[in-house]
Structure formats: C-alpha cells, structure tokens
Amino acid sequence: MSELDVKPRLSRLEAAWVIARRDFIAVLFSRAFLFFLIGPLFPVLVGGLAGSIGGEVSRAAVSTEIGLAMSASDNAAMKAASEKLRPQLRGVVPEFAEIAEARANPDFNARTFLEEKKGNYAVILSGSLAAPKVVGTRGQIDRWQGPVELIAATAMGASPTAFPESSSSVVASSAASERSNRVRTAQAAQMVLFLLTMLLAGMVLSNLAEEKGNKIIEILAAALPMDAVFMGKLFAMLGVSFVGIAVWGTVGWGFWAIAEDAIVTVTQTDYRNLPGPAVGWPMFIALGVIYFSMAYLLLGSLFLTIGAMANTVREVQTMSMPVTMMQLMVFFLAAYTITMPGSNLETFAIVFPLSSPFAMLARAALEETMWIHAVALVWQTISVALLVKGGSILFRKRVMKSGSAGRVKRKRAWFAGRKAADALVEPAE
Amino acid sequence: MHMQVGEHMSAGNAASIHKDIEGRGRPLAIEARGLVKSFDGTMAVKGVDISVPEGAIYGILGPNGAGKTTTLRMLLGIIDPDEGVRRVFGHDRPHDIGRLIGYLPEERGLYPAMKAIEAIAFMGALRGLPLAEGRTRGLELLERHSLAHAAERQIRQLSKGMAQTVQLLGTLVHRPKLVVLDEPFSGLDAINQGKLEGMIRNLAEEGVTVIFSTHVIHHAERLCEGVAIIAGGKVPYAGSVEAARDRIPAQVRLETRAREGAWTAALPEDTRREGDFFYFPLPESGVEPLLKQLIDGEAGILSLSIERAGLHDAFVAIAGEAAAKQLEADQVGGAA
C-alpha cells in the first residue's frame, strides 16, 4: 500500500485521541499522580487538626461557668435549682461553680476579682437568692441575667414545681425545612465541585508549560491542529481526574464501611439521612458528574491557554495565584446566588461559562426543572469549544514565535523609546 | 495546479531572483509566494518566495536571525503568514496532508521519561501511523542505525547524539514524502554530520523531498540541488546551487615566468596581482585568445587554472558582505 493511498491526515478526534492517550498514560504512571492522589489528605488532616485545636482553644477561652459567691446555702440552692430546670431549658442552663476565694470571706469583692483577671467565669453571682447580683461584662450579663433570675426564683420556690408533660408529633419536612435542607445540599455539592476542580486544574496549568520546557510542543503543533492538541490534553486530564476521584471514592467508601458510626459521630453529620436534592439522588449524581466535567473542561481550557503562554514552570507558579483567586471569585459568585433563585445575579452566574456548572448544580439541588440543564449543558459545551479554539489561536499567534533576536531588541527598544523601537525592525529567526 | 519552477517572479519582492533548478516538469512539493510575518510589529519575514520540486534536496541558507525558522514554520502551518500564500503538495493547509510530512525542529524535544521505541512510535502516531506499526518500523530503523540496544531505554538515559538520532528516526518513521529539517546539523559531531548527510541523500534517492535550513554553506553546497539564500527576512536568491555559482564569473589564475612585458596589455583591466599570480575573471571569449597573446608575448606560462566560484562567493555576492560575515560568525559559534 502506497503512503499516498492512506488518509492524508488524522481527523481532529483522532488527533485529540493520540494526545489524550499519551498524556493519560504518562500522567497516570508518573510520581506526580501519586502526589495528586494523596494531595487531598493534607487539607483533610490540616482541617481536622485546625478544627480540633480551634475547638479546644474556643472551649478554653469561652467559659459558660458562673462563679457563685453567695452564702453556702444559697450556692447549694442555686445548684439544685439549675439541675431541676435542666430538662426544660437544656443549653440555657449554665454551669455553677463555687468560688473558693469567696467561701466564708465577707470581704470578697466580685468586681475586683474579675478586674484582676482571676478565675475563668462568665459572670459572678453574689448577693442572695432574693436579691442576686450579677457581675461581669455587658455581653455576659445580658446573656446570663435572665436564666440566673429564673434559677434563683426556682431556688426560692417561686416558680412552678411541676411542669405539664406535652406530647409531640414529628413532621418529616415542611416547605421551610425542605428548602433549607436543599440549600445545604446545594452548598455541599458546590463545595465538593469547587474542591475537585481546584485540585485538578493546577495539573492542567503546568502541563503545557512542561511541554514547552521539553520542546515537544513544536512537534505537536507541526503535526496536528492546535485545538486538537488542546482537546486531547484536556480530556486526558479529565480522564486522570476521574481515576483520581474513583480512587478517592473507593477509599472513602472503604472508610465508611469500616467506621460508619464513628464518622457520623466525629463529623456530627448523619450522612445516611442527607437532605435529598430536588431532582432526586440518581439524577443529581449524574448531573454532578456532568457538571464536574464541564467545570473542569471550562477551567482547564482557560488554564491550558494561560499555561501555554508561560515559558517556565516558575512563570506558571506566578500565574497560579491570580488564577486561584479567579476560581474563588467564580465559586463565591455561584455560592452567593444559591439563596437568590430567579434573580439577575443567579441568571448571570448561570450564563457566565465559568460559574455556570456551579450555579446549575445548585439549581439541580433546589429546583426540579430539567430542561434548563439541557440548555445549560449545550451552552457550556459551546463555551468549551470557543475557549479551546480561542486558546489555540492565541497560542499559534503569540507563542510560536521563533528566535530571541527580535524580542530582545524590542525590550531594549522599549527602554530606548518609541523612535528606537520603530527603527528596530529586525527579524527573528 | 502546479506552477513550473522558476516561471514565477516574486510579487512581494521584485528584487528576488528565482533561477530554475533541475526540476522543470516535476510537480512542486513546496511553493511559497510573498510570505510575510511580523511578531508584535517586528518583521521576521519580509516576502519570501520559494519553489521546491518533488524529490529535491533544498537548502535554506542564511545567518542566525535571518528568518529561516519562521519561514519553515509558515510552510508547515505551525504559524500562518500575515501575507502571501504557501502550498505543500498543492494544499493550502499543510495539516491536511500531515501524514506526508516529517518535521525535525531546531530545538530538539522528546519526552524524557519515554522509551526510545515509544518516542518513535508516538511521533509516527502524530502523523497517523498506528502505534504497533510505529514500534515495528521504529525497531527496524533503530537496528539500521545501530541503536537497537537503546530501544527500551528512556530518552533521559540516552546521550544527546543518540536522542537526536531517535528524534530524526521519529521524523521518518511514517515514511513521509516531504522531510523538513530545521538546522539538522547543529549540535552533531563530524561523524554524525556525515551520517546525516548520507541519510538525506538516501531519502532523496527514494524520491523524498528534503528541505533543510542551515547556516553552514558546505552542507548546502554538498547536498542541495537548490537553495534559497535568506538574509534580513528576505530571499534575494532562490534557485539552483549551480545557477548561484554561475552568477559570479569563473576566476582565472595565471602564473608566468616573466613579470613584465608587452603581453601584460592583453590581461583584462580588472586583473589583480597577488605574489606570483595574476587573477582575473574569465573573459567572455574564453582563455584561448588570451593564451595566444601570452605565448606570442613570451610571458612564459608556468600554470593557468580556471576556478569556478563557490557557493560562499555566491552568497557574498548575493546577500552582501555583512550577511556573509554574520554567517561565518554563526558557523564559528556553531562549531564552538
């Protein structure tokens, strides 16, 4: 068979496949992918540690203990009354602790005691049951004065000694609670989508810069249309991201299977009874996968273009900060509009390509309408195609310059002034 | 429809000279007319015309910064010209016939973690060759170039010369009809340069069109059927090497026993004397009438030789002293 008998070129799809196949295999078997897989562990660990430490600090710093500086009998009566009211008032009932320094000390001055920063009490209660005196800061007094008066009244026997037993009838959900639950689902889904795209988009950002470093990009550009190269790279990284998500999902499922109860207890969230999204879980998960792909392709195509403009990995790192900020802005925009359905801002978030997948996933959690998802997906697909095309044109126009002669001279000319710049019409090789 | 080589004078650059190379009747592999390219207001190429017939070895000769790489990139469709047209095998869009083209860029590039055999197969795949077929052919090529032992080694484990050879084999694995090499000799030692020259000749013998850029005149002179001399983004000459050399009259070198005599009046006006030798351009009437006068005048001819101009002389005459000096400097720099 003569060489001229075969198809003279690859189709765009075939060209993208050649690139995607190479990139997918190369990334999957690289050390970078291993780091990528264990990457999410660090935020989880750091978040857990920070939460734990923060909670501990918070508990230590914010005291709900009320110091008792009354007579011994009054102190005992206050404690007994608070225990009596605890079933009805629950969290509103403070903890009482007798102040050792005040015991049998007629000269004890609560004001001086607090001003000297002694003890760790929210307020100090002195005086008597009939005339309790609350000493503390304005905020703490406002918070505890009412409960203290109620407890003191109970201690004096002035409040009811018996409470009527009420019956209860639980409603699974109300309009208000369903809306509230779905908003939580929408927020959680957006957060997961954002974290995943943020983790993965960084890999795309450095991808082309590395290829430029390896000088391979010119071979690719000579052999294939640049948009096919971009497309191939995007889908390779999308494939890699699905592998990553599958690994994380499997590990997460394994943990869940082993320590279901512990996870619910530690996180204080019953994942078994998460509020259902408006479109139902199966459709919501399917849309989640699709919107993740679109969010990734949209951000990826943008980042690929930015990465292609960079000459070195260092330049990529410099670009990373504004790019991350931009991701955050897009996320905040979509997150902000969750509570504003039908508003102009929500429409903008849906129409603006980069925030569209986030806003639409929230919609899937909140609204049952399906046709709008079809429209949004068509729009997002068009946006991906436009971004890829624009990126490849920009790449061919601005990046594939050769030689440094012209550029160096332009730089010098910039400093020398416009006239000199006009004079330096020197060719680059 | 192809134009005949040499029949078209540049529209964009009237000063250009396009001499016919021995390709009359052969279809054109590459045809470029009035290519112009600027980068941010800096003109890299200012109206390039090139015609390369199928099966020719064609050189683009010029100093660094002359516009060689930009021209090649435009011919290959890596970048688009701002003005002008280019056709490769009659196609306006070179990517449409990517399968027929092999390209070795000046800045060599391979994936460092890839095995040599995989790198060759991948480069074939970029041009539409199935990976399995690429591996088979790649192994054959590696064996032919005594590199079979390196097939399973990663590119980063190869020497620079071996890696360059692997990339060149990757450029050829899909058996292209047109091979474009940008400064293929740079970075190669003398032995590998010789091997590469052999490979280029073999390709031409198989009917493959080879176009390469170089700033080393000897490579162009030894290999090329046609050359385009490029300087300052323009092509002041494009045509056969022979025609380029013919632009400068042959030089006559004469050595005589007698230093003075009436016979000296027979020498052309622009004769110059260097030591024992007289140098002058070959008269249009040839040397026979002059010889007769010298003999009659008893000049005592010790030797007389006619020396054809080299491509270097032609380059100086066509591109100017400045470009020639830069070319020489590039060659010294390249050798260093």
Image (tube, helix red, strand yellow):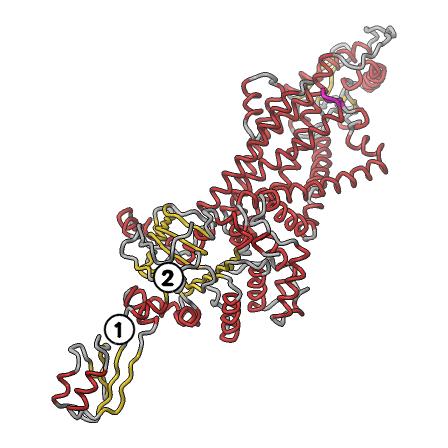
Counting residues from the start of the chain, the first of labels 1 and 2 encountered is: 2
Quarter of the figure that contains the N terminus of chain A? bottom right
What is the magenta range?
A275-280
* Image vertical order of residue B11 relative to residue A355, above or below: below
Q: How far across and down, in percent of the image, does residue A399 sit? A: 46, 48
Which is closer to the viewer, label 1 or label 2? 1
Say if the magenta span includes residue A140: no
- Residue type indicated by callout 2: Ala
Q: How far across and down, in percent of the image, does residue B125 sit? A: 61, 53
Name the main secondary structure of what is drawn in magenta: loop
User: Would residue A132 be seen by someone viewing this image from the given angle?
Assistant: yes
Residue drawn at (39%, 70%), measured in percent from left and top?
Answer: B217
* Image vertical order of residue A239 relative to residue A184, above or below: below
User: Would residue A213 be seen by someone viewing this image from the given angle?
Assistant: no
The one nearer the camera, A251 or B127, is B127
Identify the residue position indicated by label 1 in the image. B249
- Residue type indicated by callout 1: Pro
Judge if badges 1 and 2 mark residues of a common chain.
Answer: yes
Snapshot quadrant of residue B61 = bottom left
The one nearer the camera, B105 or A116, is B105
- SS state under label 1: loop
- Between the residue at mark 1 and the residue at mark 2, the CA separation in whole angstroms equals 20 Å
Identify the residue position indicated by label 2 in the image. B228
* Image vertical order of residue B45 relative to residue A363, above or below: below
The one nearer the camera, A220 or B39, is A220
Residue drawn at (44%, 46%), measured in percent from left and top?
Answer: A398
- SS state under label 2: strand
Subunit that carries the residue with mark 1 = B
Q: How far across and down, in percent of the image, does residue A81 sit? A: 83, 15
Q: How far across and down, in percent of the image, does residue A340 sit? A: 60, 18
- Residue A118 is left or right of residue A272, and the answer is left
